Image (cartoon, rainbow, N blue to C red):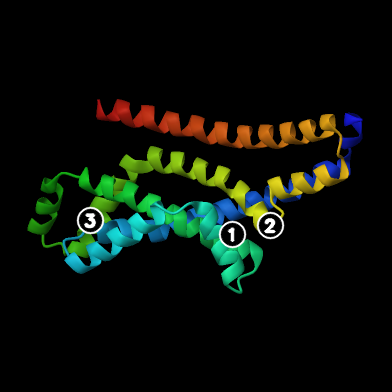
Amino acid sequence: MVSELFIVENFTFLGWGLFVTLTIAVVSIVISTIFGTVLGVLRFSKIAFLGKFAAVYIEIVRNIPLLLFILAIRFMTPAPPIVAGILAMSIFTSAVVAEIVRGGLNSIPKGQWEAAYSQGFSYVRVLLYIVLPQTFRNILPALVSQFTSTIKDTSFVWLVGIEDLTGKGMILMGRYGTSEQVFALFTIMALTYFVIIYILSHYSRRLYNSYACSKG
């Protein structure tokens, strides 16, 4: 019976899975934001070699499915399962973040750079203190939107033995095998993802509307 699912132990079990999901997502987001920003700056830079390197990395990573990165890092490296999941998510997401950052850098008027240079600022100081803060303000809605996708994409990691929310749900499905129980478990997992993603998506829309109003 479906009612057999609704016990404290099962919800605690799924709760630990959700904790793993959010841990992988948050750490991956932090790493990919840092690495993606560096890649975006290199892609934007006028130094041909660095720009070409960043462009090749971004194009290769963006055109390979995330699942292949997860499988490759899990089974071709000695990294523990959760570390492998974080590395795969970070590598993939950093390429997307890099393109978002590059777009944000391109949106900054050249006058901002010229005015800063006229005050004696170096390239690095202009980038750090003037251009990047404006860039992140402009791209924040796009970044939040990408991060919601990152949270959803963590559901792939259960395929390599990581007991995230989806992985814990699949384990419970092995214990509760009736159609009604499996449907109930899928519903619980789907609603959990939905609530998290909906909150972040709503926040992203508010950021976008706020930014649009400030620009208008």
Q: Which residue is mark 1?
A: 85
Residue 44 in the image: state x and y as whole percent.
22, 56
What amino acid is at disc 1?
Gly
Secondary element under disc 2, as helix, strand or loop, is: loop
Question: Does label 1 or label 2 sit earlier along the sequence?
Answer: 1
Residue 27 shows up from this direction:
yes
- On the image, the x and y values in percent for residue 158 come to 67, 52
The image quarter in which residue 14 lies: top right
| Dot 1 and dot 2 residues touching (CB under 8 Å) | yes
Q: Amino acid at mark 3?
A: Phe
The residue that mark 3 highlights is: 44
Front: mark 3 or 1: 1
Which of these two is toward me, 189 or 101? Answer: 189
- In three-dimensional space, the C-alpha distance between marks 3 and 1, rounded to whole angstroms, equals 29 Å
| Residue occupying the point 31% across, 25% down | 213
Residue at the image position 77 percent from the left and 31 percent from the top: 183
Callout 3 secondary element: helix
Check the image and report above or below for 86 versus 196. Answer: below
Which residue, as the protein is rendered here, is positioned at the far bottom? 78
The numbered disc on residue 162 is: 2
Q: Residues within 10 Å of mark 1 (few under 14, many from 20)?
A: many
Left or right: residue 84 versus residue 62 is right
Rendered location of residue 33, percent (x, y) = 42, 55
Whether label 3 touches label 1, CB < 8 Å: no
Q: Is residue 128 visible?
A: no
